[in-house]
Image (cartoon, rainbow, N blue to C red):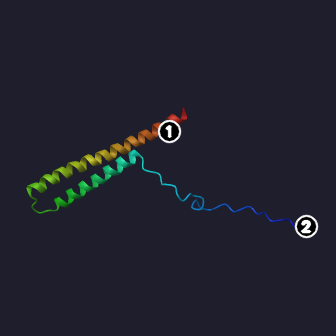
Amino acid sequence: MKAKPNMTPAKPKSTKMTRRKNTFPQSLSPFQYVFVTVIFFTLLSGGVSFWISTEDRPSPQQERIFETCNSTWNMGVGAIFGLLSSKAVQDNDDEDGDNE
């Protein structure tokens, strides 16, 4: 008698075959929303500040916009570093709490 070959189904190689079609992707966390918003406004104000700085003779209104955008750029860079450092400390605290 011949032995019957093993007829078990093959496991899928990618998760695309096993993933449900009607599942929604995960939404961003509140931290990620704040971080993306801060980055957007920081880059926008930095770009406007750079653009106005290339003008030969800016008007008084352009000078005020430049000062405002320059201040916003400086605050945004500080906020980005602050958010990143708080996230790093929070993640580090979470790891320490798991070990107890």
Residue sitting farthest toward the right: 1
Q: Residue 91: x percent and y percent?
A: 45, 41
Question: Could you tell me the amino acid type at mark 2?
Answer: Met
Q: Which residue is mark 2?
A: 1
Q: Residue at x 33, y 47 (%)?
A: 80
Q: Residue at x 49, y 54 (%)?
A: 24
Q: Residue 99: x percent and y percent?
A: 54, 35
Residue sitting farthest toward the front: 22
How far apart marks 2 and 1 lie (CA) works out to: 60 Å
- Local packing at callout 1 (Cα closer than 10 Å; few below 14, some 14-19, many 20+) is few
Under circle 2, the secondary element is: loop
- 62 or 56, which is in the foreground? 62
On-image quarter of the C terminus: top right
- 18 or 84, which is in the foreground? 18
| Left or right of residue 14: residue 53 | left
Q: Residue at x 32, y 50 (%)?
A: 37
Residue sitting farthest toward the top: 100
Residue sitting farthest toward the bottom: 2
| Left or right of residue 62: residue 96 | right
- 94 or 40, which is in the foreground? 40
Mark closer to the chain start, 2 or 1 = 2
Q: Residue 42: x percent and y percent?
A: 28, 52
Q: Quadrant of residue 52?
A: bottom left
Q: Nearer the viewer, mark 2 or mark 1?
A: 2
Under circle 1, the secondary element is: helix
On-image quarter of the N terminus: bottom right
Question: Could you tell me the amino acid type at mark 1?
Answer: Glu
User: Is there a contact, CB below 8 Å, between mark 2 and mark 1?
Assistant: no
Q: Residue at x 88, y 67 (%)?
A: 2
Q: Residue 25: x percent and y percent?
A: 48, 54
Give residue 95's mark: 1
| Left or right of residue 80: residue 51 | left
